[in-house]
Amino acid sequence: MWKNAIDDAVAKTLQNIDRFGDRFPHVSRNGKYQQIDNNDWTNGFWSGMLWLCYEYTRDERFRAAASRTVESFRERLDAGVVLDHHDIGFLYSLSAKAKWIVEKDEAARQLTLQAADTLMKRWREPGRYIQAWGPANDPKEGGRIIIDCLLNLPLLYWASEQTGNPTYKEAAAIQADKSRRYLVRGDDSSYHTFFFHQETGEPIGGATHQGYTNGSTWTRGQAWGIYGFALSYRYTKDPLYLETAKRMAKYFFERLPEDHVAYWDFNVPVTPDTYRDSSASAIAAAGLQELIAQLDECDPERAYYQEWLVKSMTSLVQHYATIGEEAEGLLKRGSYHVRGDLSPDDFMIWGDYFYLESLMRLERGIGGYWYER
């Protein structure tokens, strides 16, 4: 089943190379991807898909297209195009760092290190955290951290490994600790974002940007937490990160509906019209595989997590994937920003990426580009 799903995804991605040209897919409307310039937080996922397809097929067409995206990311960094946010890891781990991991290209390695330096500019010393969006002292966004940032921290961990400079890893670990303390609640659910006082660093409170309410649990945010804390454990071996990933995973998977694919928020009232977020389930599945990889073979919990992984991925493949259909995207029923009415029920390029990453790890052991392998 996994191989058939991968082969279909690879064929669609190959068609999309000609369809998208030098532009990047973002989210879709009515089944057609919006094609944008390299100026948003989502652009790296297309690059990551191309590198995954190249590793799987060794087809030169994927390598050439992936390399072109890396050059685009070089131009973006040189020009400073829309980089005043925490998503630098999403952009450069799946593009430049992927090229380094796959081809050991030194120029790609140097570009990735420059990206890590760019992310470090988000560090706010008074509160000792990485600010999510906007410039320092921004009256609206200053003081905000975000759970999504956990997937950007591997860029910093990796930079420390590559350079021997502990500053990157120290900042990443402090951010992970703050995320664990303030974004993860006592019942293992999560806030999307949390605010601190910009001058004193004192905690103010949790809030949402895309969830149902400030106190609800946005499912994609919970998924970022599962994968992000599992990756922080890989780099630091701090057992608290692994424990947090496990607890967040149990919260996520034990609250899924009957078909094992998430609604867009765990607290939203469920009706026949409630939107799903297949991308949240794809991220959670990828994170669950990372979590499982960190458990000993004899750990009795492995079977529990493996069962949930198979249930979730089987449902995505059988009920949400576009296998055998003429479609640009791989995974239906993703949601971007439901309350903002931005693509609440369409293809999401990050959903496609994590779905493909999960499939390839299941079938071939090809993981993502969050760490050296």
Image: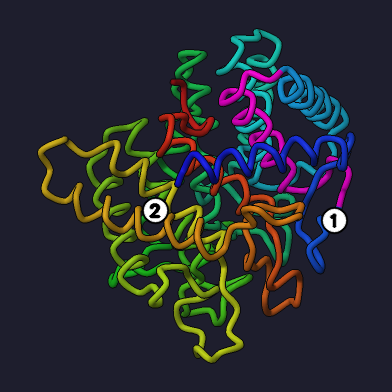
Q: Residue 94 location, x and y as percent?
A: 63, 33
Q: Quadrant of residue 187?
A: bottom left
Q: Are marks 2 and 1 in contact (CB under 8 Å)?
A: no
Q: Find the residue positioned furthest to the front.
A: 324
Label 2 element class: helix
Sequence-wise, the earlier of marks 2 and 1 is: 1
Crowding near the residue tagged with mark 2, few <14, some 14–19, many ≥20 C-alpha atoms within 10 Å: many
The magenta region covers: 35-59
- The residue lying toward the viewer, choosing from 179 and 150, is 150
For label 2, the residue is 226
> Is 245 displayed left or right of 83 in the figure?
left
Provide the secondary structure element on which disc 1 rests: strand
Question: Which mark is in front, 2 or 1?
Answer: 1
The residue identified by callout 1 is 34
- Depth order, front residue of 172/268: 268
Q: Using the image, determine if residue 115 lies above or below residue 5.
A: above
Q: Quadrant of residue 181?
A: bottom left
* Placement of 229 over or under 186, stated as above or below: above
Indicate yes or no whether the magenta region holds residue 48.
yes
Measure how far apart labels 2 and 1 are at the Cα level: 29 Å
Q: Is 56 in the magenta?
A: yes
Q: Is residue 24 above or below residue 338?
A: above
Residue at the location (46% across, 13% down)?
Answer: 164
Residue in the image at 38% along x and 47% along y: 229
- Residue 214 drawn at (x, y percent): 53, 79
Q: Quadrant of the C terminus?
A: top left
Query: What kind of residue is marked 2?
Result: Ile
Q: Is residue 194 visible?
A: no
Residue 205: x and y in percent read 48, 72
Is residue 17 found left or right of 354 in the rendered image? right
Q: Name the foreground residue: 83 vs 131.
A: 83
Q: Quadrant of residue 119?
A: top right
